[in-house]
Image (cartoon, grey):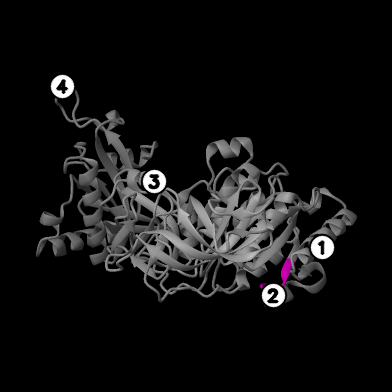
């Protein structure tokens, strides 16, 4: 819910004008406003409003024709936005933004509330901004690369990303990390506690398209709208207690590339090696950014680069120092080698090379032609919109209006829902396809019923809940042997669930590659053969691949 009521006050003060760009509506309903004949006339009216405002119109919903605030229920407001979206589509326009405020439907005297009395009470009033042209359509988007960052706490990965997406040099105190989509307590402490997201892009002349004002959602939307090529960052957590969140960011986001940060003033740490192991275990093409090179001398940078090369060789990877071989070689050979770049968010060293890399790196092969599937990473509720599930589209394409299934629920069932609208980095889009990070507003479910790890699939998909599956696993680290009844946490897509192992042959030793039955302890999930996963328990870790499933 927006706290700043200035857009509402301005619209009410200006009022409806014949030939103007502002329209007042108490509410819009499907039965009345989408009926034969009525839809065409209302779409024509909307088109007129948009043209009158040089391509932009304002619709105030929850307000009577005379400007008196009436207020409508959240359900009525949601329906009004659905109807307005359809009218806009008919008029070759789209809803760019919606702001809502709570109001007291009537004062104690029974009179309508005046604009100055807008509060935070029962009903809703909202301002929808409409723009000419269809919503952004990035169908078959091979130019949207998703990069996951990893690295030890205080090694500067979030700061590096913040500098990349804005072009602003850091102040040496990690100031640009606040430009990511982080929580207030994270900014205050200077530590990330959850996944955060950022985006920039490149235009048709390969020039960077960056955020001018990262604190405004509309500026992120502008990047999505203007860029021909997008680079989305999923910034993971460097602090050891939140390793499970880091694993979720790497395993559950359908990443194209990994970016591992190693600070020049510290060098590779135990956490660095752990994060590298997870990136490589999931077969993710990876690059290493040596950060903070401005804070040390050239000799120290050389020492850390040598340490990074040795770390990579220890795990069977071939390092490719960009300082010696050039960025073109890194573009050609990433995946078979691990490029190493020297960077600084303060001095700007190496940032041009990162821009060149991200502009040229190809999107990894996606499942755009497969049936739609998305695992929920986050859920939240938006006033006037309802429940929103966000995550990375794993496969296929989803469009606004699609009928979907969400689940499995705790009892193994799937809930029928509808994709009301789709947003990508705060910009509404007609559809989204594999590899894109989106939020999908869902009709037919409450936000409290949505849990991380649930999946969205087409209504006709006939998904089956899975409680048990057979897997091939590799034990990366364990103090003794893994026997029957071993209970680690399994991280598969966005789910993190305790599970019980029953190894074939009775046990698995560190370094073993073997088969095991895995049974989720509390909850069924949507699991498919071929999916990769990570398991951990204390300092014990391993990776695996689903080979076959047992449905409920």
Which labelled disc corresponds to residue 109? Answer: 4
Instruction: Judge depth for marks 3 and 4 and give the one in front.
Output: 3
Q: Position of residue 474 (x, y in %)?
A: 62, 63
**Magenta region: which residues?**
333-339
Instruction: Judge depth for marks 1 and 4 and give the one in front.
Output: 1
Q: Residue furthest right?
A: 299
Q: Position of residue 178 (x, y in %)?
A: 59, 44
Q: Tell me the residue at 42%/66% (across/down).
A: 549
Mark closer to the chain start, 4 or 2: 4
Q: Is residue 189 above or below residue 467?
A: above
Instruction: Judge depth for marks 3 and 2 and give the one in front.
Output: 2
Residue 382: tell me if it is visible. Answer: no
User: Label 1 neighbourhood size at 10 Å, few (<14), some (14-19), many (20+)?
Assistant: some
Q: Is residue 273 magenta?
A: no
Q: Residue furthest front?
A: 505
Q: Tell me the residue at 68%/45% (across/down).
A: 153
- Asked whether the residues under the numbered discs 1 and 2 touch, taking CB atoms below 8 Å apart as contact, a structural biologist would say no
Picture quadrant where residue 106 is located: top left
Which labelled disc corresponds to residue 398? Answer: none
Instruction: Judge depth for marks 3 and 1 and give the one in front.
Output: 1
Circle 3 residue: 380
Circle 1 residue: 310
Question: Which quarter of the rendering shows the N terminus?
Answer: top left
Disc 2, SS: loop
User: Label 4 neighbourhood size at 10 Å, few (<14), some (14-19), many (20+)?
Assistant: few
Residue 191 is left or right of residue 108, and the answer is: right
Mark closer to the chain start, 1 or 2: 1
Which labelled disc corresponds to residue 336? Answer: 2
Residue 20 is left or right of residue 39, and the answer is: right
């Amino acid at each position: 819910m927006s706290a700043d009521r200035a857009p509402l006050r301005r619209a009410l003060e200006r009022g409806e004008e014949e030939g103007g760009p502002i329209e007042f509506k108490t509410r819009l309903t499907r039965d009345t406003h989408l009926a034969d004949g009525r839809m065409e006339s209302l779409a024509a009216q909307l088109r007129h409003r948009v043209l009158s405002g040089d391509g932009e119109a304002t619709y105030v919903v929850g307000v009577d024709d005379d400007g008196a605030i009436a207020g409508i229920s959240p359900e009525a407001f949601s329906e009004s936005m659905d109807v307005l979206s359809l009218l806009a589509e008919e008029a070759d326009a789209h809803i760019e933004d919606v702001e809502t405020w709570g109001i007291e439907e009537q004062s104690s005297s029974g009179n309508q509330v005046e604009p100055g009395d807008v509060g935070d009470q029962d009903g809703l009033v909202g301002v929808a901004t409409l723009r000419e042209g269809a919503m952004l359509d990035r169908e078959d988007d091979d130019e949207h690369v998703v990069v996951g960052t990893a690295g030890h706490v205080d090694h500067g990965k979030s700061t590096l990303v913040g500098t990349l997406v804005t072009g602003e040099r850091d102040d040496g105190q990690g100031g640009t990390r606040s430009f990511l989509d982080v929580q207030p307590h994270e900014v205050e402490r200077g530590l990330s506690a959850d996944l955060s997201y950022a985006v920039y892009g490149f235009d048709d002349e390969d020039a960077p398209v960056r955020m001018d004002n990262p604190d405004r959602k509309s500026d992120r939307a502008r990047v999505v709208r203007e860029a021909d090529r997008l680079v989305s960052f999923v910034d993971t957590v460097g602090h050891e207690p939140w390793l499970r969140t880091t694993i979720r960011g790497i395993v559950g986001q359908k990443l194209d590339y990994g970016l591992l940060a190693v600070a020049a003033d510290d060098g590779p740490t135990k956490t660095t090696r752990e994060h590298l192991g997870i990136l490589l275990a999931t077969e993710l093409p990876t690059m290493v950014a040596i950060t903070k090179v401005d804070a040390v001398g050239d000799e120290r940078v050389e020492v850390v680069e040598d340490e990074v090369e040795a770390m990579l060789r220890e795990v069977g990877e071939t390092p490719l120092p960009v300082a010696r071989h050039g960025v073109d070689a890194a573009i050609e050979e990433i995946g078979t080698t691990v490029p190493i770049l020297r960077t600084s968010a303060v001095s700007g060293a190496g940032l041009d090379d990162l821009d060149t890399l991200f502009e040229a790196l190809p999107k990894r092969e996606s499942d755009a032609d497969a049936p739609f599937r998305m695992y929920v990473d986050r859920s939240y509720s938006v006033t006037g919109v309802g429940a929103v599930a966000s995550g990375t589209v794993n496969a296929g394409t989803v469009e606004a209006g699609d009928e979907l299934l969400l689940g499995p629920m705790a009892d193994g069932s799937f809930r029928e829902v509808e994709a009301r609208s789709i947003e990508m980095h705060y910009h509404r889009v007609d559809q989204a396809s594999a590899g894109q990070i989106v939020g999908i507003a869902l009709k037919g479910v409450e936000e409290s019923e949505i849990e991380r790890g649930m999946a969205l699939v087409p209504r006709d998909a006939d998904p089956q809940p899975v409680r048990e599956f057979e897997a091939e696993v590799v034990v990366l680290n364990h103090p003794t042997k893994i026997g029957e009844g071993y209970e680690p946490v399994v991280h598969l897509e966005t789910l993190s669930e305790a599970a019980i192992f029953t190894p074939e042959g009775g046990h698995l030793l560190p370094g073993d590659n073997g088969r095991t039955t895995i049974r989720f302890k509390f909850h069924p999930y949507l699991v498919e053969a071929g999916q990769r996963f990570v398991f951990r328990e204390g300092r014990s870790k391993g990776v695996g691949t689903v080979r076959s499933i047992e449905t409920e």
